[in-house]
Amino acid sequence: MTTSAELIEVSERRGAHNYHPLPVVIHEAHGAWVTDVEGKRYLDCLSGYSSLNFGHGNPKIIEAAKEQLERLTLTSRAFYHDQFAQFCTGLGDLTGKDMVLPMNTGAEAVETAIKVSRKWGYEVKGVEPDQANIIVMEGNFHGRTTTIVSFSTDPEAHDNFGPYTPGFRLVPYGDIEAIRRAVDANTVAVLVEPIQGEAGVLVPPDGYLSEIRALCTAEGVLMVADEVQSGLGRTGQTFACDHEGVVPDIYVMGKALGGGVVPVSAIAADRDVLGIIHPGQHGSTFGGNPLACAVANAVIEILGTGEFQARAAKLGDVLHVKLRELIGKGVVEVRGRGLWAGVDIDPAIGTGREVSKALLKRGVLAKDTHGSTLRLAPPIVVSEEDLLWAIDQLVDVIYELKTT
């Protein structure tokens, strides 16, 4: 099996169809560019759904991984290891929080935040046993575990996976009054994506996050920010919450925390919240392993300079100015922040997938979501020249679709 066609055929025949990939087989990658098995190069404008914020094969991250691979990869949390203290200190300092609880995937981090919120509700807030509720948003995407899909409003993620986990109250995204009406004495947390990525890079109204913060403080409820996609430099700040100067009670992190090398996730909170977790109550054999911590330590060091945040902000301005010029010319709406955009293609022209496939032929990797929306999130290391080239390819694709 050496050709793309052969590899795709076997992958489709032997692998479960839980994804619908574009027809490209990637063999190698550096920076913002990838190469398929036939040697054709593509500009990556998806970044592994923001897992590759710092580029493919980032030298600092790869060097940290190599050094750790040769020394120690796993101890389980039955023992201490020499990377863990630095990881907890670094991530705690980055978030401004006292404590860190590491896991592996973003979904695990969200599950961890749910468990911690409930336990805090019972042991600190005084909620009656098994009565805790968490307010969540319509259009959310927090993962695909059985608990998380219980409050998904996406039929593909939700339907036929019941019975569903109770204890969640759905409200419209961006509507602070709906949250206010949903809060009661048994509410332990409000779980929110500062920007809804999977829903189409939806940015809430100005002041929304600040209002959630104020409401949670007033009502004695935890504000939990899922920054798995929006965090760690993508939006031009370390966290998307930073755009409103908001500090949640619990940060949920993943994706870019692993530098595109290994799965690393974590939640961070102050001691009065995370201190309620005791031995045996939550964990994972691989959570916080030496390799994961070494990689994450390199990521944290990179973020500490502020260079990537500033670069995402600068290039994001270029991206959004150029994309907004397409509104009314085959594009209906453009949303996003920093180096992250959701582009609604005019349905009369084609679907998001049709646009993605046309871009693929032109050497640009992007991905659709929810029918007509195209997501763009290149690695922050992308050059301005390459970014403008990718937008030119989108302009040409839209023109071709309009005229055929």
Image: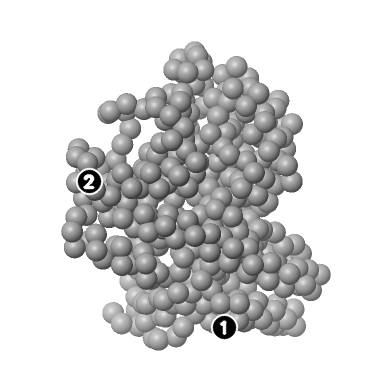
Residue 155 shows in the view:
no
Q: In the rendering, which numbered label is found on residue 130?
A: none
Position above or below: 175 against 259: above
Between residue 34 and residue 95, name the one nearer to us: 95
Q: Residue at x 58, y 80 (%)?
A: 386
Position above or below: 27 against 202: below
Q: In the rendering, which numbered label is found on residue 81?
A: 2
Indicate the secondary structure of the residue bearing disc 2.
loop
Q: Residue at x 31, y 44 (%)?
A: 85
Q: Quadrant of the C terminus?
A: bottom right
Residue extending farthest to the right is 328
| Residue behind mark 1 | 362
Q: Residue at x 40, y 48 (%)?
A: 90
Residue 286, position as x, y percentages in the image: 27, 46
Q: Amino acid at mark 1?
A: Arg
Residue 291, position as x, y percentages in the image: 27, 55
Position above or below: 29 against 213: below
Residue 244, position as x, y percentages in the image: 67, 45
Q: Quadrant of the N terminus?
A: bottom left
**As drawn, is 149 to the left or to the right of 71?**
right
Residue 261 shows in the view:
yes
